[in-house]
Image: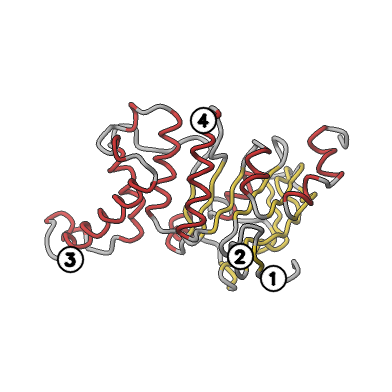
Amino acid sequence: MTAAAQPYVTADGRQIGDVLMEMRNITLKFGGVTAISDISFDVQEGEIRAIIGPNGAGKSSMLNVISGFYTPTEGAVYYKGALRPPMKPFEVARQGVARTFQNIALFEGMTVLDNVMTGRLTHMKASLADQALWWGKARDEEMKNREKVEEVIDFLEIQSIRKTPVGRLPYGLKKRVELARALAAEPSILLLDEPMAGMNVEEKEDMSRFILDVNDEFGTTIALIEHDMGVVMDLSDRVVVMDYGRKIGDGTPDEVRNNQEVIDAYLGVSH
């Protein structure tokens, strides 16, 4: 079990709260292969928490455990102070966990607006019959969901492409649309799997700004995987470092940057 984390105020004055999610002694095995070995860490409410490590470190596997795609072989996930039983991804989403993917997972033939609307599925309660007839509760519900989606579209500055099929968009804008879809779910915790992957410098700067704005203006807790160390050190409040399925570092960006085991792992000295 990890030590109880304490709320704190960051250097730029942001309040970081209590533990929102805690991974306790997580081990994940696929047959005889151990992807994650006895790792514990927490994510505090309001922070940007980075998970980093060399290729093959187990980062995406850990994100898949958090989002419910994988059930850990050993250990437990605690969410808002309660033990989370084994859940399917849609059940985890209903709890307030949204994510983006390393490989963009959008509906290419649908418009940006329709793609972002799919992020509201967990908020749609009307029956199938009401939705088909589009009257009463279903109509009111859709109007409210549309209002929220339009707010997200405005926030991420993609108004000009809202009616454009996603398949026609350049890579960087597709990444932003995927972020919009996740934000439309109004998550308590947002998981970002390599949000900067494949982007040029200008696109990375835009995405970094939006991530900071989401955290600051919406108060959304963010856990992200990212290979660009400059981005990680600039954005993150705390960083957990993985290597070959083990945790080798955990702390502020400065603490991690000066951790010799972390330095060795990235330089390949320890292997």
* Disc 2 to disc 4, C-alpha distance: 29 Å
The correct choice, above or below, for 64 with respect to 47 in the image is above
Q: Which element is circle 3 on?
A: helix
* Lower position in the chain sequence, tag 3 or tag 2: 2
| Image-quadrant location for residue 163 | top left
Report which residue position mark 3 lands on: 137
* Disc 3 to disc 1, C-alpha distance: 43 Å
Under mark 1, the amino acid is Gln
* Lower position in the chain sequence, tag 3 or tag 4: 3
Under mark 2, the amino acid is Ile
Under mark 3, the amino acid is Lys
State the mark number for residue 6. 1
Please tell me how crowded label 3 is: few (under 14), some (14-19), or many (20+) other residues with Cα within 10 Å: some
**Which of pointers 4 and 1 indicates the residue nearer the eye?**
4
Q: Quadrant of the C terminus?
A: top right
Q: Position of residue 48 (x, y in %)?
A: 60, 54
Residue in the image at 23% along x and 63% along y: 126
Q: Are marks 2 and 4 in contact (CB under 8 Å)?
A: no
Please tell me how crowded label 4 is: few (under 14), some (14-19), or many (20+) other residues with Cα within 10 Å: few
